């Protein structure tokens, strides 16, 4: 299993865009892909829902 992380402290630098596009490209190459969205903005999760991806689970952090 390969794991890729897209990290930068700066907002709006393209982390989510790069992550979701890389995921789709890998899937089209025949890989099984999971995106783990730890950002409180949840942009990648929202994007996955909009795409109608097969599995779209949400785990809320317990306080
Ligand atoms: N390579 C790129 N060229 C042009 N615009 C981009 C590129 N990568 C990201 N963007 C745009 O920049 C904005 C911020 O990107 P985003 O991936 O949400 O950043 P982050 O996740 O780092 O906050 C979005 O509007 C996105 O469409
Ligand atoms: Mg983001």
Image (tube, grey):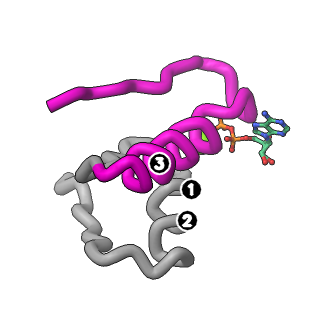
Q: x, y (%) of residue 35?
A: 34, 49
Callout 1 crowding tier (Cα within 10 Å): few <14, some 14–19, many ≥20: some
Q: Are marks 1 and 3 in contact (CB under 8 Å)?
A: no
Q: In the rendered structure, does residue 36 fall within the stretch colored magenta?
A: no
Residue at the disc numbered 2:
47
Kindly state the secondary structure of the residue where label 2 is placed.
helix
Which of 55 and 27 lies nearest the eye of the viewer? 27
State the count of labels. Answer: 3
Residue at the disc numbered 3:
40
Which of 60 and 16 lies nearest the eye of the viewer? 16
Q: What residue appears at the point 31 percent right and 72 percent down from the top-left corner?
A: 56
* Left or right: 13, with 62 as reference point: right
Q: Nearer the viewer, mark 1 or mark 3?
A: 1
Q: Which residues are magenta?
A: 1-30
**CA separation in Å, label 1 and label 3:** 8 Å
Q: Nearer the viewer, mark 2 or mark 1?
A: 2
Q: x, y (%) of residue 41?
A: 55, 52
Q: What residue appears at the point 50 percent right and 40 percent down from the top-left corner?
A: 22
Callout 2 crowding tier (Cα within 10 Å): few <14, some 14–19, many ≥20: some
């Amino acid at each position: 299993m390969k794991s890729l992380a897209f990290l930068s402290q700066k907002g709006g630098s393209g982390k989510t865009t790069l992550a979701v596009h890389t995921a789709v490209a890998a899937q089209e190459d025949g890989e099984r892909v999971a995106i783990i969205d730890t950002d409180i903005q949840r942009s990648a999760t929202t994007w996955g829902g909009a795409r109608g991806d097969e599995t779209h689970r949400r785990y809320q952090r317990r306080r």
